[in-house]
Every structure is written in structure tokens, then in C-alpha cells.
Image (tube, helix red, strand yellow):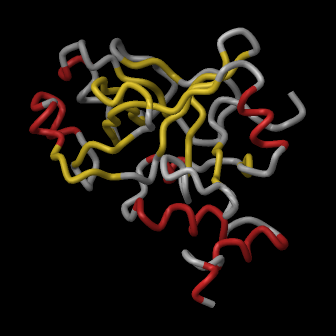
Amino acid sequence: MDDGIAVGRLLVATPQLDDPNFRRSVVLVVEHDTVEGTLGVVLNRPTEVPVDRVLPPWAELATGPSVVFQGGPVALDSALALARIPGEDEPLGWRALDGDTDVGRVGLVDLDAPPGLISAEVIQLRVFAGYAGWGVGQLESEVDDGAWYVLPGEAGDVFAADPERLWQAVLRRQSGDLAFVATFPEDPSLN
């Protein structure tokens, strides 16, 4: 697809996207096809709920901040996890993101599997409640309408130490005028 939407890419909300679910969000695309649509997780919405409160067996593997992140507005009562592993092997309980990704060896974790299956392989892990989803053609339409920038991701984006600053950080590293968007005020009416 020529819109750039692909697994491993980031959807970065433009300043004109004012939906509270996605305002200043950075979404990692984890599935994208022309039959099912697109699924992603918001990377920069940490909650105050500790991982050990909802998934105690996975808490010691969670990368700080060791809280559950709100992955999107859909199915908030379900959880999914992303983990980064070294090497080329694909351990049981972990599935690499398909596609040509720039986010390194990041994949989805089977949270129903015992953590011991992959604990020795996990470099970083983050747990998300819910996800973001778009029907076929819906996200492409939103991109065409100027709601999202579709940008390459980096391995550190998924596990950013300061997730609240991820929107600015991703934009700041872009070339040209797009880097200036990182300085867009939170409330332009106060300028």
C-alpha cells in the first residue's frame, strides 16, 4: 500500500486529531491487511495500575514503568503484551510481528502461556489493556484526512522510559518541517 501503513510502523496523531482516545498518541501497528483491517496499540498511555495487580506472573518481566498501558479504546478488559527478544529464534509463547518492521525483534506474547517459557529470552516486555482497531479502509481514510502521520518506528519506542514524551520524541527525530510539529502547543488557544 502506498500510504505507508504496515506492521511495525507508527501512527502518530497530528495536532488536528482531537479525539480524546488518540490525542497526541503514538500507535504501533501490529496487524494490517486488506481483509481484516488494522490493529494497533497505543504506546504512550501508561495507567497507574501495576502489572502485578492484573497479571502477577508477568510483573517481574515488565519493563519500567511496570504498569499496564491503555492500548486503545477497544476491549479494555483484555490484555496483550509486546516483548523484545534477541537473536533470530522464535521462542514458544512469542510471535514476531509480521512484515518489514523497524522496531527490532518485537512480538506479541501469549499471556496464557507460563512466563517461564520465554522469560530467559525477554529483553523488554510491556502489557497493554485494550487495543486500537480500524475496519478495512478506515485508517487509510483517516490518514488521507490528515489525522495521522505514518512514520518508521524504532525498537526503543515500544519500551520508552518516558512514554508521556514519546509523541514529541518521535516527531522531533523526523526530518524537515515535521520535526517542528513536536513543538505544537498542547492548547494553541493559549498562545
Q: Is residue 103 left or right of residue 33?
A: left
Q: Choose top left, top right, bottom left or bottom right for residue 100.
A: top right
Residue at the far right: name it: 2
Q: Is residue 81 left or right of residue 9?
A: left
Instruction: Tell which residue pokes out farthest to the top in this image.
Output: 35
On-image quarter of the N terminus = top right
Residue at 56% x, 77% y is 187
- Between residues 175 and 44, which one lies in front from this camera angle? 44
**Residue 56, how many percent across, how many down?**
10, 32
The x and y percentages for residue 156 are: 49, 53
Query: Which residue is at the far bottom?
Result: 191
Taking the spot 39% from the left edge, 34% from the top edge, the residue there is: 83
Give the number of callouts.
0
Q: Is residue 61 left or right of residue 147?
A: left
Position of 46 relative to 191 (above/below): above
In the image, residue 113 sits, relative to residue 96, either above or below, namely: above
Q: Toward which corner of the image does residue 124 lie, by quadrant? A: top left
Question: Which residue extends farthest front?
Answer: 189
Q: Position of residue 74 (x, y in %)?
A: 44, 28
Q: Residue at x 76, y 14 (%)?
A: 34
Residue 165: image x %, image y %? Answer: 47, 67
**Which quadrant does the C terminus fall into?**
bottom right
Q: Please, is residue 21 above or below residue 111 in the view?
A: below
